[in-house]
Image: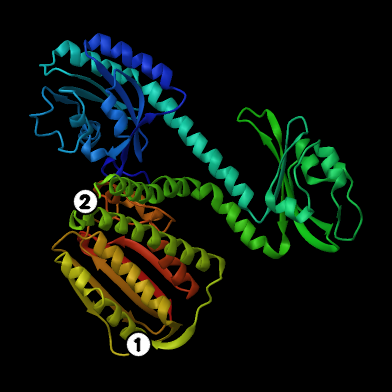
């Protein structure tokens, strides 16, 4: 999910190949509104970038990044309405740390740029060095320009997303343990990824697909050599989809069995673009299949992670380090402590994210075996809840726990405590001050059921199918800037499934506000 403007950053560097056209638009706007400065910003959900400008003060160049909440553009993004200011020094809406205060700009008028669906994708603004009472004609001109800027913003955001996806997929392909080879429509080799080059003991790739296939030390499972024309890559190049062709590769004096798939690559209009062959080592087939299935479903989430969950704390750390570097050496240590504390908080956030990613990867790949033992699940739940009382008290949340005496269960003690902790952290994070969180453990002859019910903001019906997906964060988390990575419930689901149980999320019964998470484990 995209982050809201409250956690975004304003970047004043030029953005994208549409800059020249946007600069010209800004110049026209400045003349039409009879002002010195005009700016066109785009908002991609993570950052606000200066797409085009005319007469932008030199002072802005010294503030290349700032929190959007400190900017006038942020006021437009947050409210969704135009922001018109006659005097930036006396208007109480102008934040004290706004970049505009470092310049000579004294008046401002900003209008939201919306996409065809009505979503805000940028801000069109004009400003000047003299205070003024904006005329209706001037404001109408800025509004008209904002509507005209929709195409600029859409083109830039589309190019940016395309570039990020291409970089992500290129890096991912080269990091796969699965071998990948591809050629273009003329049969020229364009890709043999690192894994396949390592298997074949080759370096750079050149020449035609016919030559490459003819050099492959490959046979069928019975040892009969496979002609180049029968290779999956060349069959795919001629329009045939090949799935499950088992082949022996004879490399380094060993024979390794692969399942090779071949696929034609076509444009959306059916025009041939080339072909790709994928080499799956049978011994790692399950892992490779799982990775490929997850690729399309999670690529946007991973892009969001790289673009926000990693970049935001790194940006904060970098900003504080820059401030510390530029501080007067005689500055008392007490005055520097807030910046050090801020950098430490961002560092801790990164560390937690890395720990969660490593834990998720280990659970997902089966590299973290369960240490099963006979435990008292009731005692483990009670003790874990007791450890969260301080966290609940800090938000004035009433935390209750109802468990029967002695509930024997064959399970991994550490993972059970982690499961309860994840559910509690989720409930406490999404419950406002003064709410309640109730933890209940019940038993039947067949199952042990753990429920964590809160009186929090609740989950909209359309988001319920996605709450256990990796990196999923609901709209309320974005709106209220609730900290998190969207991995906790995914880890909870994996722990539950490794114990052969089920986990569900839904509204509280009797139409009460909030959410109930229920884990059911077989006895």
Q: How crowded is mark 2: few (under 14 residues within 10 Å), some or many (20 or more)?
A: few
Q: Is residue 516 above or below residue 461?
A: below
Circle 2/circle 1 CB separation < 8 Å: no
Q: In this view, does 457 lie above or below 139?
A: below
- Determine whether, in the image, residue 118 is placed left or right of residue 261: left
Residue 50: name its quadrant.
top left
Residue 376 image offset from top left, x and y in percent: 36, 88
Q: Which residue is most to the front?
A: 330
Q: How crowded is mark 1: few (under 14 residues within 10 Å), some or many (20 or more)?
A: some
Residue at the location (46% across, 61% down)? 357
Q: Which of 41 and 511 is in front in this view?
A: 41
Q: Residue 255 carries which label?
A: none
Residue assigned mark 1? 407
Q: Is residue 24 above or below residue 294?
A: above
- Secondary structure beneath dot 2 equals loop
- Determine whether, in the image, residue 22 is placed left or right of residue 7: right
Residue assigned mark 2? 330
Residue 490 image offset from top left, x and y in percent: 42, 62
| Disc nearer the start of the sequence (2/1) | 2
Residue at the location (33% across, 71% down)? 421
Residue at the location (32% across, 23% down)? 40
Q: Which of 421 and 98 is in front in this view?
A: 98
Residue 367 visible within the image: yes
């Amino acid at each position: 999910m995209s982050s809201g403007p409250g956690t975004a950053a304003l970047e004043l560097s030029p953005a994208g190949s549409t800059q020249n056209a946007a600069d010209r638009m800004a110049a026209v706007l400045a003349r039409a509104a009879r002002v010195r400065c005009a700016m066109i910003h785009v908002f991609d959900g993570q950052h606000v970038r200066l797409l085009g400008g005319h007469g932008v003060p030199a002072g802005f160049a010294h503030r290349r990044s700032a929190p959007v909440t400190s900017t006038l553009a942020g006021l437009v993004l947050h409210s969704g309405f135009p922001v018109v200011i006659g005097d930036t020094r006396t208007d109480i809406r102008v934040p004290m740390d706004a970049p505009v205060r470092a310049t000579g700009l004294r008046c401002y008028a900003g209008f939201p740029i919306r996409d065809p669906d009505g979503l805000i994708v940028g801000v069109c603004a004009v400003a000047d060095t003299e205070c003024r009472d904006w005329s209706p004609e001037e404001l109408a001109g800025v509004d008209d320009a904002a509507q005209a800027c929709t195409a600029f913003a859409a083109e830039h955001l589309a190019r940016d997303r395309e570039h990020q996806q291409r970089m992500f997929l290129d890096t991912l392909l080269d990091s796969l343990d699965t071998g990948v080879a591809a050629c273009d429509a003329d049969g020229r080799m364009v890709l043999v990824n690192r894994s396949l080059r390592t298997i074949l003991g080759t370096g750079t790739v050149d020449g035609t697909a016919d030559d490459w296939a003819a050099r492959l030390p490959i046979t069928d499972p019975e040892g009969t050599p496979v002609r180049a024309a029968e290779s999956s890559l060349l069959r795919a190049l001629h329009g045939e989809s090949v799935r499950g062709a088992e082949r022996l590769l004879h490399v380094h004096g060993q024979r390794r069995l692969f399942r090779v798939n071949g696929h034609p690559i076509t444009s959306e209009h059916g025009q041939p673009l080339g072909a790709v062959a994928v080499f799956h080592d049978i011994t790692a087939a399950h892992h490779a299949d799982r990775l490929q299935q997850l690729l399309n479903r999670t690529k946007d989430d991973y892009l969001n992670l790289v673009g926000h969950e990693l970049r935001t704390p790194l940006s904060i750390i970098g900003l504080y380090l820059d401030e510390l570097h530029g501080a007067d050496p005689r500055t008392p240590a007490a005055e520097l402590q807030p910046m050090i504390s801020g950098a430490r908080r961002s560092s801790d956030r990164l560390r937690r994210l890395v720990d969660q990613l490593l834990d998720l990867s280990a659970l997902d790949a089966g590299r973290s075996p369960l240490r099963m033992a006979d435990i008292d699940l009731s005692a483990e739940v009670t003790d874990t809840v007791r450890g969260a009382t301080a966290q609940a008290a800090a938000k004035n949340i009433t935390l209750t726990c109802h468990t029967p005496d002695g509930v024997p269960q064959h399970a991994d003690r550490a993972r059970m405590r982690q499961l309860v902790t994840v559910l509690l952290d989720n409930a406490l994070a999404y419950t406002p001050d003064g709410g309640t969180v109730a933890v209940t453990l019940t038993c039947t002859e067949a199952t042990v059921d753990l429920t964590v019910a809160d009186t929090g903001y609740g989950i909209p019906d359309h988001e319920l199918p996605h709450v256990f997906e990796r990196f999923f964060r609901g709209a309320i988390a974005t709106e209220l800037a609730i900290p998190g990575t969207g991995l906790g419930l995914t880890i909870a689901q994996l722990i539950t499934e490794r114990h052969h149980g089920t986990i569900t999320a839904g509204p509280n019964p009797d139409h009460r506000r909030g959410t109930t998470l229920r884990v059911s484990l077989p006895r």
